[in-house]
């Protein structure tokens, strides 16, 4: 596919994310995001929430017919909305977690690519299932590119990596958790991915009328033990850890709800009180909508797992990423377009 990558500060760059919980989009012109930490400058922040796990059978196959009739038209609609209003110079459609872990994810994404190609006048788009390494890297780029801590000419590797030290990037998603051990800012080859299905487990809990705290604790313990057992097998601590970044919508929403001003750095021990507050909300769960209960369970499970990971790795403080994967995709494309490179490679 031949593409023209003439960079323009005045033409939009767009991202459409296919996640475990639905379709999410953003776009922006480069000159609109000069204040890189001002996340409000992004446009087309649209979402269509649905449960992809409802289409996945016990053998990890997505129902292709149901996807074609129920989901694909929504994806095409979101793509067309941005194409008509923005005509972006680059448009990246990325799929995460479930699409990577299901056995026919490539065929499903092939449907998406063909449907977009059929209606698109522009050839400046790409449709891709992200590898675990690339998904983690893009979440990290979203933090690195929007952080108020960093001056313009920061030598990140020199200032943040010391001898015999590594950085940790943790991306807690609705279907998977990625943990990367970083020797420098560009090397994400040492990335672990754990298939946790937090969103699905939260929906199953929210569907029940009476859920005891013991049942919730059993779910948390089951997922936590799986992650920590797998992590202990694959990780040997031979380095000091110089920093840790944590990304995930459940973590950032937890941060926004529980603090008057969203934090950019937290102490691991400070998670104890917010976890207690989340658990106390379960006593009032009958007054909440189904989706509100789902969000409480997602936050409780996600934050509990995070606390376990941080404890295992002996991490006392961590940075919260208030950006997201789509913003990471945006900046990754922007940097490449500035150099007249293919924004999707």
Image (tube, rainbow, N blue to C red):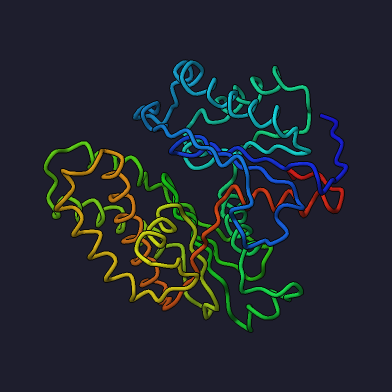
Q: Residue at x 78, y 28 (%)?
A: 123
Q: Position of residue 69 (x, y in %)?
A: 48, 15
Asked whether, in this view, residue 282 is left or right of residue 105, the answer is left
Q: Position of residue 29 (x, y in %)?
A: 74, 46
Q: Is residue 229 visible?
A: no
Q: Nearer the viewer, residue 318 or 315?
A: 318
Is 293 drawn above or below residue 278 in the view shown?
Answer: above
In the rendered view of the protein, which quadrant contains the N terminus? top right
Q: Position of residue 184 (x, y in %)?
A: 66, 70
In the displayed orientation, state which residue is furthest to the bottom: 163
How many labels were placed on the picture?
A: 0
Is 119 drawn above or below residue 310 in the view shown?
Answer: above
Q: Residue at x 35, y 56 (%)?
A: 302
Q: Is residue 148 visible?
A: yes
Is 136 drawn above or below residue 174 in the view shown?
Answer: below
Asked whether, in this view, residue 253 is left or right of residue 36, the answer is left
Q: Residue at x 44, y 18 (%)?
A: 66
Asked whether, in this view, residue 344 is left or right of residue 2, the answer is left
**Which of the 4 quarters of the picture holds residue 36?**
bottom right
**Which of the 4 quarters of the picture holds residue 150?**
bottom right
**Which of the 4 quarters of the picture holds residue 228?**
bottom left
In the rendered view of the protein, which quadrant contains the C terminus? top right
Q: Residue at x 48, y 52 (%)?
A: 193
Q: Position of residue 33 (x, y in %)?
A: 70, 55
């Amino acid at each position: 596919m031949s593409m023209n990558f003439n960079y323009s500060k005045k033409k939009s760059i767009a991202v459409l994310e296919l996640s475990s919980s639905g379709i999410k989009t953003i776009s922006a012109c480069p000159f609109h995001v000069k204040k890189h930490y001002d996340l409000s400058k992004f446009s087309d922040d649209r979402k269509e929430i649905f449960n992809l796990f409802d289409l996945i059978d016990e053998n990890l196959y997505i129902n292709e017919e149901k996807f074609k009739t129920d989901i694909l038209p929504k994806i095409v609609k979101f793509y067309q909305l941005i194409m008509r209003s923005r005509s972006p110079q680059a448009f990246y459609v990325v799929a995460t977690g479930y699409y990577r872990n299901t056995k026919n994810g490539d065929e499903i994404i092939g449907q998406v690519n063909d449907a977009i190609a059929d209606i698109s006048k522009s050839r400046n788009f790409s449709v891709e299932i992200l590898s675990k390494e690339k998904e983690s890297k893009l979440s990290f780029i979203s933090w690195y590119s929007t952080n108020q801590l960093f001056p313009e000419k920061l030598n990140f590797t020199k200032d943040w990596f010391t001898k015999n030290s590594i950085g940790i990037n943790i991306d807690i998603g609705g279907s998977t958790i990625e943990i990367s051990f970083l020797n420098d800012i560009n090397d994400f080859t040492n990335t672990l991915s754990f298939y946790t299905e937090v969103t699905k487990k939260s929906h199953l809990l929210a569907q029940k009328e009476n859920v005891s705290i013991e049942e919730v604790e059993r779910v948390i313990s089951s997922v936590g033990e799986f992650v920590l057992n797998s992590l202990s097998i694959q990780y040997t601590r031979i380095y000091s850890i110089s920093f840790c970044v944590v990304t995930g919508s459940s973590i950032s929403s937890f941060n926004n709800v529980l603090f008057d001003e969203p934090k950019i750095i937290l102490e691991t021990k400070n998670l104890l009180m917010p976890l207690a507050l989340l658990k106390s909300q379960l006593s009032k769960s009958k007054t909440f909508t189904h989706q509100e209960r789902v969000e409480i369970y997602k936050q409780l499970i996600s934050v509990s797992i995070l606390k376990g990971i941080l404890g295992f790795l002996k991490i006392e403080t961590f940075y919260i990423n208030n950006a997201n994967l789509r913003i990471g995709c945006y900046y990754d494309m922007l940097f490449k377009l500035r150099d007249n490179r293919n924004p999707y490679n």
